[in-house]
């Protein structure tokens, strides 16, 4: 798969690079990120190095792209967003945002950019994007809902986090779904 950057007025999405390792390590050491992700905890510099040097390039090669969120092309990493290929027409989206960058609409913009790219025929040509999060991750759910993901239910013991199975929320967005907040989400 070709590598692509995506941009909006206030946001730049590009693959993370080696010079981002320290910023990624600092952000992923935050307890609020560890609570809701499957990343190692504690998160070490070697984890960030492996992510940038191995995980990201192999993902791009295998239709599972990852982008760093920045406020401008040369800005520091504020978060990460990626798609994990399920098959040629479906992928799962995942994202995190550093605490200092939250509540500004950056992740909603990023999810929209990534979904637009993923559904385009000259992008990835996907038909479905799935969102999953541990039950209770209301911040992630709020972003997915704003973008138009439809809540599909609770998957019992649906995700593994550092050796422990946890229940997960599941939602989906189809290429022709309206991009407006959907009803039916947990309160």
Image (cartoon, grey):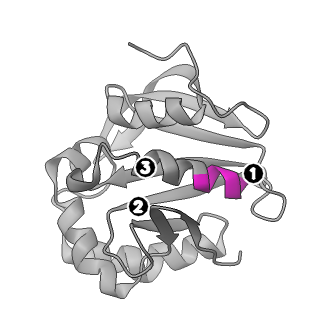
Examine the residues drawn in magenta and state their main secondary structure. Answer: helix
Q: Which of marks 2 and 3 is nearer the N terminus?
A: 2
**Tag of residue 18:** none
Tell me what residue is drawn at x 79 percent, y 35 percent: 176
**Residue 93 lies in magenta, yes or no?**
no
Which quadrant does the N terminus fall into?
A: bottom right
Crowdedness of circle 2 by 10 Å Cα count: few (<14), some, many (20+)? Answer: many
- Could you tell me residue 79's position as x and y percent? 35, 60
Quadrant of res 8: bottom right
Snapshot quadrant of residue 156: top left
At mark 2, the secondary structure is: strand
Q: Which mark is residue 107?
A: 3
Name the residue tied to disc 2.
80
In the displayed structure, would residue 141 be above or below residue 84? above
Question: Where, quadrant-wise, is the C terminus in this rendering?
Answer: top left
For the magenta stretch, what is the residue range? 113-118
Give the foreground label among 2 and 3: 3
Q: Say whether disc 2 or disc 1 marks the residue closer to the N-terminus.
A: 2
Residue 34, visible in the rendered structure: yes
The picture places residue 141, in percent across and down from the top left corner, at: 43, 31
Q: Does 98 sit above or below residue 180?
A: below
């Amino acid at each position: 798969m070709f590598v692509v950057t995506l941009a909006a007025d206030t946001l730049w999405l590009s693959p993370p690079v080696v010079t981002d390792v320290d910023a990624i390590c600092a952000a992923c050491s935050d307890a609020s990120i560890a609570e809701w992700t499957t990343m190692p905890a504690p998160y070490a510099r070697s984890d960030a190095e492996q992510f940038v040097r191995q995980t990201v390039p192999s993902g791009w090669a295998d239709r599972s792209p990852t982008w760093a969120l920045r406020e401008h092309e040369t800005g520091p990493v504020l978060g990460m967003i990626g798609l994990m290929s399920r098959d040629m027409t479906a992928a799962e989206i995942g994202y995190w945002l550093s605490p200092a960058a939250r509540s500004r609409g950056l992740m909603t913009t990023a999810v929209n950019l990534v979904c637009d790219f993923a559904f385009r025929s000259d992008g990835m040509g996907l038909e479905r994007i799935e969102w999953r999060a541990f039950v209770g991750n209301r911040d992630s759910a709020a972003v997915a809902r704003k973008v138009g993901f439809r809540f599909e239910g609770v998957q019992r013991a649906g995700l593994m986090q550092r050796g422990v199975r946890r229940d997960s929320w599941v939602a989906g967005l189809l290429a022709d779904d309206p991009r407006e907040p959907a009803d039916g989400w947990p309160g």
